[in-house]
């Protein structure tokens, strides 16, 4: 039992380390189908991950109680503003039960310097469960066909030039 606890703690620490452009990235040999459960946009409109076809999607599953998640919010805002008009879409997805209202989530993101990022909630946690996501932050990458092409474990300094360039390289190669 102690060994399992130690392995879990070490795993969490490793997964929460900041990502350099290509560190902690896993690109699959073949794309995978996206889950079909819905996520809810801040506007109240429902989407499936496959609804974003035509864009290269960076879907970040996060939690308001996750330190590494909070630490990357400001850089996610910069990333969003840098890529939003270039065929890359950022989806910030958190569990529905963490929020009482859309207004609360807007205030929260503003407080953490991420007021520009569109946010979504995973209403029943089914999208995260279908993707096997049980730890935050967890980034899932989708090509322009709406297929999952890979993942990034842990947090990143998203607004760094090398990270933005790496995402554009992935878009070009797997787009």
Image: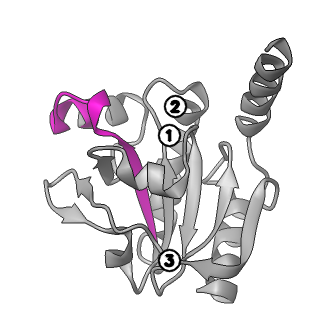
Asked if the residue at tag 2 contacts the one at tag 3, i.e. Cβ–Cβ closer than 8 Å, the answer is: no
Q: Is residue 91 left or right of residue 135?
A: left
User: Which quadrant of the structure image shows residue 36?
Assistant: bottom left
**How far across and how far down the image is residue 147, in percent?**
51, 79
**Residue assigned mark 3:** 33
Q: Residue furthest front?
A: 1
**How far across and how far down the image is residue 102, in percent?**
18, 39
Q: Earlier in the sequence, mark 1 or mark 3?
A: 3
Disc 3, SS:
loop
Q: Residue furthest top?
A: 2
Q: Residue at x 25, y 37 (%)?
A: 106
Q: Magenta region: which residues?
A: 89-105
140 versus 106 height, above or below: below
**How far across and how far down the image is residue 122, in percent?**
32, 48
Residue at mark 1 to residue at mark 3: CA–CA distance: 28 Å
Q: Nearer the viewer, mark 1 or mark 3?
A: 3
Query: Is 101 one of the magenta-colored residues?
Result: yes
Residue at mark 1 to residue at mark 2: CA–CA distance: 5 Å
Exactly how many numbered labels are in the figure?
Answer: 3
Q: Which mark is residue 70?
A: 2
Q: Residue at x 43, y 28 (%)?
A: 64
Q: Which mark is residue 73?
A: 1
Disc 2, SS:
helix
Q: Earlier in the sequence, mark 3 or mark 2?
A: 3
């Amino acid at each position: 039992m102690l060994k399992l606890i130690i392995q879990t703690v070490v795993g969490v620490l490793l997964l929460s380390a900041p990502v350099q452009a290509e560190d902690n990235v896993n690109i699959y040999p073949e794309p995978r189908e996206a889950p079909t459960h819905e996520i809810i946009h801040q506007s109240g409109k429902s989407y499936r991950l496959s609804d974003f076809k035509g864009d290269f999607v960076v879907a970040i599953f996060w939690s308001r109680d996750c330190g590494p998640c909070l630490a990357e919010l400001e850089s996610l805002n910069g990333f969003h503003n840098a890529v939003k008009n270039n065929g890359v879409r950022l989806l910030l997805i958190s569990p529905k039960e963490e929020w009482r209202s859309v207004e609360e989530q807007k205030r929260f993101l503003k407080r953490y310097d991420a007021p520009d990022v569109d946010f979504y909630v995973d209403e029943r946690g089914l999208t995260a469960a279908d993707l096997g996501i049980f730890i935050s932050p967890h980034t899932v990458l989708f090509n322009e066909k709406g297929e999952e092409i890979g993942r990034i474990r842990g947090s990143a300094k998203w607004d760094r030039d090398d990270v933005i360039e790496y995402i554009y390289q992935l878009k070009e190669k797997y787009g």
